[in-house]
Image (tube, rainbow, N blue to C red):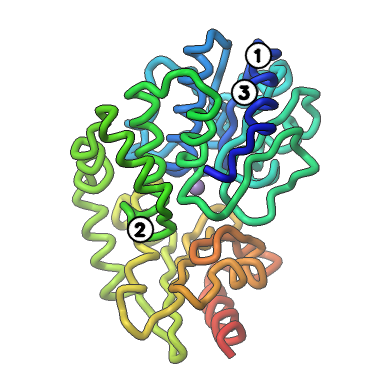
Amino acid sequence: MEQVSQDNIRAFRSAIQESGRIAVVGHTHPDGDALGACTAMALWLSAAGKTVACVLPDTPADNLQFILSPDILYLCNDADAPAAQECIRSCDLVIQLDCNSFSRTEGLEAALKASPARKILIDHHLNPDRDSFDLVFSTPEISSASEFLYWVLKAAGGAVTEAIGTALMTGMTTDTNNFANSVFPSTFQMASELVALGVNRDALLQQLYSSYRENRVRLMGYMQYEGLRVLPGGAAYMILTKDIMTRFDLREGESEGLVNVPLSIGAVKLSVLLKEDDGHFRVSVRSKKGTSAQELALRFFHGGGHENAAGGKVFIGTDIPDAGAAESYVQNALKTFLA
Ligand SMILES: [Mn+2]
């Protein structure tokens, strides 16, 4: 794995050797990759005798809770801010995974900035904030933070156990949409090695893709039938309002994957999903090769991410006067972008 240099691995090993209390940090609304990578990192550090906690900005969604390890302490800033903040204040090493800057941790950003701890970043998003970290493993030429961590841990030595492998396989699988995008030769190699190690992919796929509630399937159908708008020029969008989420009793994480559906239309090259939240809409953008989801998110949604998978926000009160104006905002953004 060319992204893992001997110098970086030496620095990684000595930073861990010289640390006793380690905080493993993931991004806001942690997805499968963030949870898988954080869990794997914490299990590996725990096996190395370190005191470790995963510090997350938000409590993981119900449908991703299965990724969490009973052997690891998770401190979620939304549920227990004092404990989460204190952990970052008092640790001597921070390892941040699956996000390129402190700002992606929202409520933890100030504590991370103020913390005197040494800081390591392992990530696969564009434009990492290198100045904020002492050691950076970063490349967009990899499927996921979970895959990157796999190669780092292999190079660093120490066992990749079945539990660690399962967490990493989960993160890679969700970030690639089960091998549908951002897949590299190294990704198949990792998967092959982990299956040989004993990781049970059948059980994993069952958990990820065949364990939804009925409400979620009905919501997906409703949004495709009633909510989908397709614009000339190849852009599609959907707006998931609080009203719709209430009507379908939708829980956090249950609209995962919805933004990908319009890309199954041949004429659609860009898909946007707006999801209403308090004071803003959360925006997900997906695109086919040749169209940049990242650029759209940067220019119109205060966001970023990957070339074909990005995200951002539309703020109510500044970008738009009220929630009802979201539709004309996204229409304008798409028309301008594709013009
Ligand atoms: Mn990721």
Q: Which circle marks residue 23 in the picture?
A: 3
Residue positioned 43% across, 54% down in the render: 184
Residue positioned 65% across, 67% down in the render: 298
Please name the amino acid that badge 3 sits on.
Ala
Comes first in the chain, label 1 or label 3 = 1
The crowding category of the residue bearing disc 3, from other C-alpha atoms within 10 Å (few below 14, some 14 to 19, many at least 20), is many
Percent across and percent down for residue 243 are 39, 61
Residue 135 location, quadrant = top right
Q: Is mark 3 within 8 Å of ligand 1?
A: no
Q: Is mark 1 within 8 Å of ligand 1?
A: no
Q: Is residue 72 left or right of residue 224?
A: right
- The alpha-carbon separation of the residues under discs 2 and 1 comes to 40 Å
Comes first in the chain, label 3 or label 2 = 3
Percent across and percent down for residue 82 are 65, 21
Residue 49 location, quadrant = top right
Q: Is residue 307 above or below residue 55?
A: below
Comes first in the chain, label 2 or label 1 = 1
The kind of secondary structure element at disc 3 is: strand
| Residue carrying label 1 | 17
Q: Is residue 139 above or below residue 88?
A: below
| Residue carrying label 2 | 257
Please name the amino acid that badge 1 sits on.
Gln
Q: Is residue 167 above or below residue 18?
A: below
- The alpha-carbon separation of the residues under discs 1 and 3 comes to 14 Å
Q: Which residue is at the front of the view, 78 or 45? A: 45
Q: Is residue 34 left or right of residue 90?
A: left
The crowding category of the residue bearing disc 1, from other C-alpha atoms within 10 Å (few below 14, some 14 to 19, many at least 20), is few
